[in-house]
């Protein structure tokens, strides 16, 4: 047999070895992904089982108690429901099982639930033994995935967090329970939370209950959709850039973000731990403002101050919330980074008129929130580590398609980010600025950043005081974006994230709905920049006649009660107007 010379063998051998290597790598990768998908299947199966149990107990209860007035219970506002529960005219089991059933039903349409908190069944029995009935006696409460409930996962949409149940309830959940509330489900979030969409690989996408082709917003999107569709009456969410306010606005409900440390954040999981620029907050979502106030009133009690000493011992200021003194209200109808769409501006201007007619004083006040502040301060604040904390979370995970684009941007090495930023500079300046600010900063630069934030906050408060304002009326973006658009339009969070940087209380109240005229006016919207983002915003928000629009209400730090009182006034005037139409 002729012995082949090395000269002709090596290229074949080389190719063969290379092929083997590629195939092996591909096989290993395939095997790893198959294992991950198996975990996904397992997690989904577990969720199905839990939700089936939830339906079963609700059905059994209904069969044994045919007299339960489910429709009436579901239609009662929170304050009335809690009165009826506290004075004994409604038994708590009627309310809990009615909501279990409703939540199960709406979930079939919009996929908003991630977990059933089965222990609510035994907690119901505990609550019934309460001698002094708490302020939320017998009220079922839904909880965002990222807020810890003992014995349950807080996944943030990551497989690595499956089967790692919390050892303890978060402090807010503990206090709510002591006030008689019954947490009963956990709700869906976008993978990694840092998004205002609501989809992850494990539990899939949540749909907007008002139009299933639209996003419910995020990251507290499961809560927004669940409450918006009537499956829960009170929910807890979190907000680091708009995550309570955006889903509330998109789903037509109310939400409130307090000053970060007014409530305890113990037991709230987050993806970017350690950053000190954007201040996260934990807050309520509900159908009306009185519900938000009741939630704050119930939480601001000695139990909370004892369980978390970092919370200032300030009880709820009833006299501020109940006051009817006329307010001095600053307002503006667009921010300076992305021009508000016609419907957003109309929502602000109509609300301004209602407030004026009711005897309040309105003063134009526009935060000097420049593009510079958004890109250089806000973005850098979250990604000063060159986005490595964010990226690390996604390592070894199956990635949600919506998250991929941003992940791709954050994963690039610094030099490449700078290069692409330089190339895109003249074409898409806003994309260029975003990329340019995702690079690694030195400690010194971060200290400068923090002092810039402080300085900005001081100036902002000085301007506010100079005009002697009580509160501020601001635009809120909306209506609900078509599914898939939130991840492409992250620049819009400039409307909400400002108040996380300032750490001011801020809430949203729905005030109107999109009209045919708004649609028509939107067609000639060009924005400030006439760029890719401005065009996308039109595509994301068009064809929305009838969908809700909200405004944002803001107050100075620690003025939660004043902010809520202002929100209540906006809600009252809006409802009065709608009645008279
Ligand atoms: C309980 O409160 C509701 C709502 O305020 C009221 O309509 C009802 O009459 C009260 N029932 C009793 C037994 O006090
Ligand atoms: C739902 O939204 C889509 C666009 O996302 C729109 O085409 C459709 O007309 C809407 N449906 C209803 C019932 O409003």
Image (cartoon, rainbow, N blue to C red):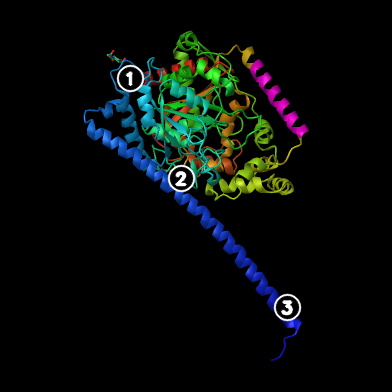
Q: Position of residue 33 (x, y in %)?
A: 54, 56
Q: In the figure, 156 relative to 238: above or below?
A: below
| Residue identifier under label 2 | 203
Ligand 1 resides in the quarter of the picture at top left
Q: Which residues are magenta?
A: 443-462
Helix, strand or loop status at disc 1: helix
Q: Give whichever of 429, 247 is nearer the camera.
A: 247
Main SS category, magenta section: helix
**Left-right relation of 22 to 324:** right
Residue identifier under label 3: 10
Residue 429 appears in the picture as rendered: no
Discs 3, 1 touching: Cβ within 8 Å:
no
Q: Earlier in the sequence, mark 2 or mark 1?
A: 1
What is the C-alpha distance between the residues marked 2 and 1? Answer: 34 Å
Labels 2 and 3: the sequence-earlier one = 3
Task: Name the outermost residue toward the right.
Answer: 444
Compared with 66, 329 (above or below) is above
Q: Quadrant of the C terminus?
A: top left
Residue 260 occupies quadrant: top right
Ligand 2 under 8 Å from disc 3 Cβ: no
**Local SS, label 3:** helix
Query: Does residue 211 sit above or below 80 in this rendering?
Result: below
Q: Which mark is residue 85?
A: 1
Q: x, y (%) of residue 526?
A: 55, 38
User: Of 572 and 525, which appears nearest the observer?
Assistant: 572
As rendered, which of 247 and 549 lies closer to the eye? 247
Q: Which mark is residue 505?
A: none
Q: Which element type, helix, strand or loop, lies under badge 2?
A: loop
């Amino acid at each position: 047999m002729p012995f082949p010379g090395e000269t002709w063998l090596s290229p074949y051998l080389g190719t063969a070895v290379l092929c083997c290597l590629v195939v092996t790598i591909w096989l290993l990768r395939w095997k790893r992904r198959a294992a991950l998908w198996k975990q996904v299947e397992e997690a989904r199966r577990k969720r199905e089982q839990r939700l089936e149990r939830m339906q079963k107990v609700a059905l059994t209860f209904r069969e044994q108690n045919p007299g339960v007035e489910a429709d009436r219970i579901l239609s009662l506002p929170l304050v009335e429901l809690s009165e009826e529960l506290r004075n004994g005219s409604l038994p708590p089991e009627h309310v809990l099982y009615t909501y279990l059933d409703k939540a199960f039903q709406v979930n079939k349409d919009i996929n908003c639930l991630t977990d059933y908190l089965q222990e609510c069944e035994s907690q119901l029995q505990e609550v019934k033994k309460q001698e002094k009935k708490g302020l939320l006696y017998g009220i079922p409460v839904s909880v965002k995935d990222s807020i810890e409930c003992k014995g349950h996962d807080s996944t943030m949409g990551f497989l690595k967090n499956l089967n790692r149940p919390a050892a303890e309830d978060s402090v807010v959940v503990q206090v709510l329970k002591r006030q008689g509330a019954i947490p009963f489900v956990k709700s869906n979030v976008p993978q990694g939370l840092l998004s205002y969409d609501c989809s992850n690989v494990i539990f899939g996408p949540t749909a907007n209950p008002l139009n299933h082709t639209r996003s419910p917003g995020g990251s507290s999107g499961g809560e927004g959709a669940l409450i918006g569709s009537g499956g829960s009456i009170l929910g807890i969410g979190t907000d680091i850039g708009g995550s309570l306010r955006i889903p509330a606005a998109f789903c037509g409900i109310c939400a409130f973000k307090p000053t970060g440390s007014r409530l305890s954040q113990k037991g709230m999981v987050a993806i970017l731990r350690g950053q000190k620029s954007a201040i996260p907050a934990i807050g309520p979502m509900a159908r009306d403002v009185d519900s938000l106030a009741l939630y704050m009133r119930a939480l601001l009690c000695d139990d909370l101050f004892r369980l978390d000493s970092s919370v200032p011992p300030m009880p709820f200021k009833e006299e501020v919330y109940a006051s009817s003194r006329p307010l001095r209200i600053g307002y503006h109808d667009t921010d300076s980074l992305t021009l508000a769409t016609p419907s957003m501006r109309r929502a602000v201007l109509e609300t301004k008129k209602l407030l004026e007619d009711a005897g309040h004083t309105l003063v134009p006040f526009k935060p000097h929130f420049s593009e510079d502040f958004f890109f250089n301060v806000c973005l850098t604040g979250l990604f000063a580590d060159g986005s490595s904390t964010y990226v690390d979370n996604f390592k070894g995970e199956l990635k949600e398609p919506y998250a991929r684009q941003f992940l791709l941007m954050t994963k690039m090495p610094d030099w490449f980010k700078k290069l692409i930023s330089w190339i895109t500079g003249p074409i898409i300046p806003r994309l260029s600025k975003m990329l340019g600010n995702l690079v690694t900063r030195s400690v010194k630069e971060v200290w400068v950043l923090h002092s810039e934030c402080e300085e900005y906050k001081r100036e902002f408060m000085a301007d506010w005081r100079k005009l002697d304002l009580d509160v501020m009326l601001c635009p809120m973006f909306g209506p609900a974006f078509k599914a898939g658009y939130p991840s492409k339009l992250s620049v819009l969070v400039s409307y909400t994230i400002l108040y996380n940087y300032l750490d001011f209380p801020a809430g949203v109240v729905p005030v109107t709905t999109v009209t045919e005229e708004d649609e028509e006016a939107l067609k000639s919207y060009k924005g400030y920049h006439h760029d890719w983002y401005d065009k996308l915003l039109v595509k994301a928000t068009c064809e929305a006649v009838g969908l809700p629009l909200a405004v944002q209400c803001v107050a100075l730090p620690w003025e939660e009660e004043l902010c809520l009182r202002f929100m209540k006034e906006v809600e009252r005037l809006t409802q009065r107007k709608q009645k008279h139409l």
